[in-house]
Each structure stands twice: as C-alpha cells, then as structure tokens.
Amino acid sequence: MRIGELAARAGTTPRTLRYYEARGLLPARRDDHGHRTYDARDLRLLEQIRTLRDSGFGLEETRPFVECLRAGHPEGDVCPASLAVYRRKLAELDALIGELRGVRGTVAAQLVRAEAAAAECPEPRCELGGETW
Amino acid sequence: MRIGELAARAGTTPRTLRYYEARGLLPARRDDHGHRTYDARDLRLLEQIRTLRDSGFGLEETRPFVECLRAGHPEGDVCPASLAVYRRKLAELDALIGELRGVRGTVAAQLVRAEAAAAECPEPRCELGGETW
DNA sequence: GTAGGCCCTGACGCGGACGTCAGGGCAAGG
DNA sequence: CCTTGCCCTGACGTCCGCGTCAGGGCCTAC
C-alpha cells in the first residue's frame, strides 16, 4: 500500500509518516514511481508508535518498541529496552503527578485565601486605591 | 535599579525582563542613557509573575495578577479576573492529573503484562526470531 | 485535452518562553 | 589608552511533532 492508505489506516497523515521516516523510525520501500510502499508489517509498527504517542511517549521512546517488533517479537514491549522505557515513564509520571498535586494544593490554598481577602473588602469599594477601606 | 539588578533580585535574567516588556507585561522607564530603570514596585510585580510561572501558569495568565497589583491592591490575586484564573487552572490541573493517572494505570498494566510475557520466554533464547521458543 | 487525485521534495510556520549571538555604546578604573 | 562590565537593539536558535504551503510529476477518467 502507499503512504496515504497507511496513514488513513493508522488514523494519521502522510506528513507524519514522512516525518517518521526522516527520523529513521519507519523506513519505506519505493515503487518504480518513487512512491513509498508499505505492507501490513509496517502498519503494525506504525500502530505501535501511535499507541505509545497517544499515551504521551516521545517519538524516540517508541524506538525500542519498534526495533523489538522488527527483531521478530510478536509484541514490541517484551524486550528489555522497551521494559526500561515503561519503567522510566512510570517514574516520570509519578514525579509529574506528584508535582502537579503539589501545585494543585498550593493553588487551591491561594484561591481560598484570595477569596477570603476579596470578601473582606468587597467590590467595587476596593476596586481603586488601597486606602478606600 | 537597572535591568541586571532587578533580574538578579528576582532570580531571572535581563533577557526575560526584556521579553516581559515586549509582551507589555512589565514596561520600564528609561534613564538618560536609554537604560531601563525599575523600582521596588516593579520588583513586586516581577515576583508575582515569577511565582505564578514557577507554578506552571502561562505568561498571559499572570497578566490579571499584575494588573491587579498595578491597580493598587496589596495582593495580586484578590481581583475577580485573578480568581477566575485560579479556578480555571485548578480545573486544568484536575483534568490533567486525572488523565495522567489514567495513562499511569495503562502503562503499569502494560509493564506487568510485558514482564510476564518476557519471563515466559526468557532471554536470550527469544532474542532472535519468533520460532526459537 | 484536461481535470482530478495521489504522490514527490524542500522549506517555512507554529507555540512558549526564553537563550544566545552579532554588533555597538558608554562609563569607570588602572 | 585600554580593558572590563554593564547596557542597548535586532534577530536567529531551541525543543517537538508535525501542519502547511510551493512547485512539480505521473496516472486515470471524462
């Protein structure tokens, strides 16, 4: 199949596939017209990439999975490098979630405090100047 | 004080202050040499911006706070527009945290599955080819 | 013949918040 | 006089994953 069909089957665009090829992630054969040609195996690789991307993995992080599939494994994540990516991502997610929860708490506290302060000196009396109250 | 000193006091760089000025967020007076001049009030505004930025707020989101301070309020977050930004950010954080937790769960499940699959067909026997097992 | 429709390459745009470099000025200190 | 150190403007680079032209080719259908 050609690039348009593969892109459609994977729910993406030709531009994206060319980009992956430029990154060395999904190389393509060419037909006698110079058009890129793909097979079902490429679709499998692409689906692996898209699934990971949709979960927030960076493009480079998908490489071990793709290479694992290309090495002949039925699943892209059984290789040690893929497992390492999973684990690293889990740690990143935990760190990020923790950080965000901290921020959330801080913002919530600020909101409560600011609401109280605003209520203590309600609009529009305190709109202008600091001595109005 | 001049740009270098203000930047140092706020723990940032002159480039950042020029950027804020270009965005209309922190305009500066000029001395007779054309150098930017700031006072303690500008430091207060800048600290407000940096605090919010450090919590993940976008630059534009800090604008209501800065304008609130500039309007004469002792705190930048007592104005309605600032409160609205807080509330919107809280909602964003909740949505993001929820999404990330979902992803975390998915990744964790995949990791467990992949580890089991890898153990069922351990290295290096299954390293090459699919028929080795 | 020509109008689609698909493909090609190359290259710029985007968003956000700056970093960094080029080229130049002005003032104080040795 | 010359260096050092601060400042200025303008403009390009960064990161990421593409989107979006611009300009051109080939095949098919009408």
Image (tube, coloured by chain):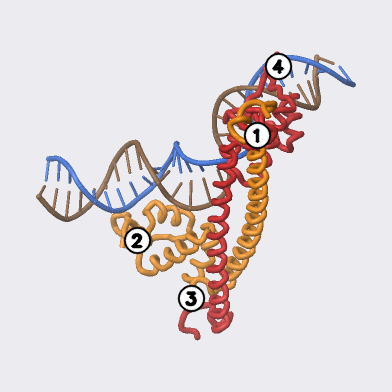
Chain colours: A red, B orange, C brown, D blue
Say which element carries label 4.
loop
Name the residue beneath numbered marker 4. Answer: A31
What chain is tagged by disc 2? B
Kindly check if marks 3 and 1 are in contact, taking CB atoms under 8 A apart as contact: no
Instruction: Give how far apart the Cα atoms at labels 1 and 4 are.
Output: 20 Å
Instruction: Give how far apart the Cα atoms at labels 3 and 2 are.
Output: 22 Å
Q: Residue at x 66, y 53 (%)?
A: B105
Would you identify the image quadrant in which residue A51 lies?
top right
Q: Residues within 10 Å of mark 4 (few under 14, many from 20)?
A: few
Compared to residue B3, the image places residue D3 above or below, namely above
Dot 3 and dot 1 within a common chain: no
Front-most of residues B16 and A130: B16
Dot 3 and dot 2 within a common chain: yes
Where residue D17 appears, as percent x and y from the top left, is: 61, 39
Q: Is residue B30 visible?
A: no
Type of amino acid at the residue the image marks with label 2: Leu
Front-most of residues A67 and B126: B126
Would you identify the image quadrant in which residue C29 lies?
bottom left
Dot 1 and dot 2 within a common chain: no
Type of amino acid at the residue the image marks with label 4: Asp
